[in-house]
Structures are given as C-alpha cells and as structure tokens.
Image (cartoon, rainbow, N blue to C red):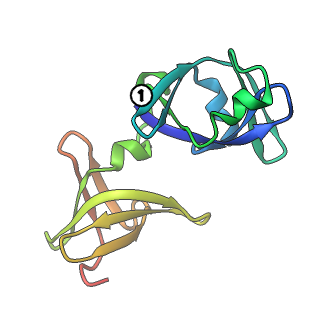
C-alpha cells in the first residue's frame, strides 16, 4: 500500500472532504479508487465518486458520505492506494515509496544509513538518511549527488561526505 494523502477537513454541506494530497500533482489522487483509509488501528475502504481541484485545494466526494456530519468523521484518516493502481515509473524515475528503506553508501564505501523519508523543498527533493550515529539530509540530484539506485539490491550510491 502506498500512502498518498490525508483527509484534512470538510467542504460544504453535502459530505465532500478536503484532501491533502502527497501525489506529484495534487489532483492526481482523484485518479485512484478505491482508497484504503487508516486511522490508528482502524481501516476502511471507500470509493471516490467525484472530485476536483478547488484553487489549491483538492476536494472529493466519497460514496455513502452525503452530509457534513458524516464527512467530519473522516477527518484525520490517512489515504492509501494499492501500488498496482499507480502507473509504472519511467526509466530513471522513482516513487518515493520505492526509495524508503534503501541502504545509502557513499563513493568511499561508507554506509551512511537507510533512507527514512523524503522532503519536497521546491528546488529539489531531499532524502533523509538515518545512520547509526547521525542523520543526513542529502539533495536528491541525479547524477550529481545520487550516482546509482539499485532497487533490486536495495542500495543507493551517493557522492556525499560522511561528515556532512
């Protein structure tokens, strides 16, 4: 399952929800249905009936959610979709979920740690690598810094100083 967003609020009185989307283009989250919603230990599967980009906000209508009170019960639920719903990544492109957990080694052969998360900064994405003694924030710049990604071996090779 791929974490693609979160229900962040309600929109109007007819049961529509506001969605904070993690997809490349915010509205792309609306292309995927069903959604698996998770909150704490609870899960539920919902069908997206309709949705749109409303200024910078994504709003969605979920089947069976027809009023504001019912929509409010979904606030804070995390949105997941099956990886098989996503299009295949193009050559040289990666889903963030593919990178999390990769072991990162620099050109000197020093293992810096494992990719814990990624950040979108505007200029470029940044991988957060959790080492045993420290954390590294490494710009995701191919091929300048990120030299090689081997998903099969679960490894990434970078040109990055271990002390930085």
Q: Look at the image and tell me whether residue 36 can be seen.
A: yes
The residue depicted at 51 percent of the width and 20 percent of the height is: 45
Tell me where residue 126 sits by quadrant.
Answer: bottom left
Q: Quadrant of the N terminus?
A: top left
Relative to 1, is 54 on the left or the right? right
- Tell me where residue 74 appears, x and y as whole percent: 63, 34
Relative to 24, is 158 on the left or the right? left
Relative to 17, is 147 on the left or the right? left
Tell me where residue 134 sits by quadrant.
Answer: bottom left
Decide: is 106 above or below 116: below
153 or 41: which is nearer to us?
Answer: 41
For the residue labelled by badge 1, is the local secondary structure a helix, a strand or a loop?
A: helix
Q: Which residue is mark 1?
A: 83
The residue depicted at 33 percent of the width and 50 percent of the height is: 100
- Tell me where residue 10 appears, x and y as whole percent: 76, 38
Decide: is 83 above or below 156: above
Tell me where residue 137 sits by quadrant.
Answer: bottom left
- Tell me where residue 61 appears, x and y as whole percent: 74, 24
The residue depicted at 43 percent of the width and 47 percent of the height is: 96
The residue depicted at 24 percent of the width and 79 percent of the height is: 162
Q: Look at the image and tell me whether residue 88 can be seen.
A: no
- Tell me where residue 55 appears, x and y as whole percent: 84, 45
Mark 1 Cα shell of 10 Å, populated few (<14), some (14-19), many (≥20): few
Q: Residue furthest bottom?
A: 163
97 or 155: which is nearer to us?
Answer: 97
Relative to 42, is 162 on the left or the right? left
């Amino acid at each position: 399952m791929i974490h693609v967003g979160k229900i962040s609020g309600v929109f109007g009185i007819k049961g529509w929800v506001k969605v904070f989307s993690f997809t490349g283009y915010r509205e792309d989250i609306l292309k995927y249905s069903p959604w698996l919603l998770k909150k704490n230990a609870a899960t539920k599967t919902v069908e997206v009936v309709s949705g749109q980009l409303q200024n910078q906000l994504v709003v969605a209508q979920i089947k069976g959610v027809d009023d504001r009170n019912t929509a409010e019960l979904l606030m804070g639920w995390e949105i997941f979709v099956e990886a098989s719903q996503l299009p295949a990544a193009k050559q040289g492109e990666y889903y963030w979920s593919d990178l999390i957990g990769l072991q990162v080694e620099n050109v000197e052969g020093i293992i810096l740690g494992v990719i814990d998360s990624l950040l979108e900064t505007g200029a470029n994405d940044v991988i957060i690598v959790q080492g045993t003694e420290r954390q590294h924030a490494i710009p995701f710049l191919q091929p300048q810094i990120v030299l090689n990604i081997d998903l099969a071996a679960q490894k990434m090779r970078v040109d990055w100083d271990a002390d930085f």
